Amino acid sequence: MDITSIVLLLLSIIYFLLIVGTFIVILTDKTNTSRTIAWLLVLMIIPAIGLVLYYVFGYSPRRNNKGIEEYNKFKAALTSEMPEIENYYEGVYKEKVRPQYHPLVDLLERSNDSWLLYGSKVEIMTTGQAKFDALINDLENARHHIHMEYFYFRKDKTGNHIREILMRKAAEGVKVRFVYENIANIDINPRYYYTMRKAGVEVLPFSKGSLPWIRRNLNNRDHRKIAIIDGKIGYTGGMNIGDRYAFEWRDTHLRIKGQGVYGLQYNFLHIWFESAGGLPENIREYFPPCKSYTNNLLQVVPEAPNSRWPYYLLASVHIVSNAKKHIYIQTPYYMPADSLLQALKTAALSEIDVRVMVSRKADIFFMDPAIHSYYQESLEAGIKIYELTDTFIHAKTMVVDNYVSVIGSSNMDLRSLELSFEINTYMYDEEIARQNCEIFFNDMHGCREIILERWKNRSWIRKIIESVMRLFSPLL
């Protein structure tokens, strides 16, 4: 046997062992059965490419305790500087929430100490103009610090305008910290951020490290949208920074004053700490005293793929399973996890009014058949589906029983439920719920309802494509 044959034999053995080893790793992943099946299919259909794809995108960080360890380091560092924060809010306001939602409050508090916060003034914004006009005004009036963390921060008119403000405020002596999702914004030249740093803005990428040992999995993106001004005003919701969000899409965002800002600040500082930023000096200055504006009760809840449990999924199933009257959902992508889909169908079959609003056309063409694959069984169970026809709906909202509202960054798909770093605000407030219901029904005027009998008559080719895409929907 010549040297070439020996090398080829060794490479074949290594390749075989890699395939078998990867199969074993995938099979032993108990975090999500649907994803396990999808990755096994990929590996069987395109083994060589599938091996690379799984290595780069597939491994679930929930399989180890790294996320818990990192969070505990952050919490220890913060409480050593500000010990009163550790248990200050725990259980203080729970009696103000309706008793049937106490288990939900307890569940959500387990997600990185997501305290129940009282007295916030919450403004719901449904247009980019409202959000960006208010945000720009608040940024211009910043005196102590500005913290921003965004999935998309585009290099366009809107993004450049806000970037100029950040650089100018940094030059004035305001502490400006900025976390950007570097994988999602890979098309932006590094000099864009270098110029910000040169002007005094502290800029950090979310993912640090290099192949093959990248610090965070390339598939686990920072999908959050957070802005904090002086620890007194906070923004969060569905809108990224860019012209598309300012002028084109239908979206929902929150402007918060009061204790609710503490929740945003805590989670921003956690990501800043994990992104190698450490903790700012004089940490108490980032949690200034605030007054109560209303009787609002809310929890700012992070979702992280390296946490022990998928809290957004668990909370969504809990809320849906305990609904008594109605469930109204707006989402760009309707591809719920099996457990959530079963809960939604159970609610609809129990004669609860379940309505889901999506767009007629997704922003990514291959998402449509995957989304449509969930329509028929949902309609058959009595879930009403509405498609917004005149624009793309990027809002991520849920309102239940005229009391609980959820507004944040999480879509109703496996990426948000399992893979991405998200932030969502859970509000226990009749007035906020009333506003959310009103927004939902106003949007219905621009929708077409999907009728089951008509939907069944779509072509067999579409049905086949939908079935195929359904198999791979956990990976989209």
Image: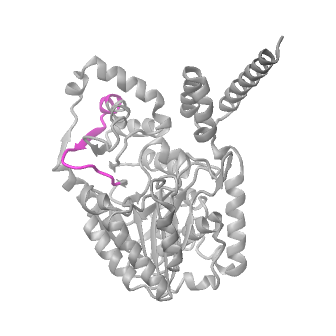
On the picture, is 66 further left or further right than 357?
Answer: right
Residue drawn 67% across and 26% down?
A: 23
Residue 402, picture quadrant:
bottom left
Of 64 and 320, the residue lying toward us? 64
Residue 114, picture quadrant:
bottom right
Residue drawn 26% across and 63% down?
A: 127
Furthest residue to the left?
445
Of 178 and 185, the residue lying toward us? 185
> Is residue 39 part of the magenta span, yes or no?
no
User: Could you tell me residue 264's position as x and y percent?
Assistant: 50, 70
> Is residue 378 part of the magenta span, yes or no?
yes
Q: Is residue 328 visible?
A: no
Classify 213 as above or below 178: above
User: Could you tell me residue 328's position as x and y percent?
Assistant: 32, 50
Classify 198 as above or below 205: below
Residue drawn 24% across and 42% down?
A: 387
User: Could you tell me residue 413's position as x and y percent?
Assistant: 44, 42
On the picture, is 100 further left or further right than 309?
Answer: left
The boundaries of the magenta stretch are 376-395
User: Could you tell me residue 213's position as x and y percent?
Assistant: 70, 48
Of 83 and 423, the residue lying toward us? 423
Of 225 and 51, the residue lying toward us? 51
On the picture, is 295 further left or further right than 110?
Answer: left
Q: Quadrant of the N terminus?
A: top right
Q: Is residue 425 visible?
A: yes
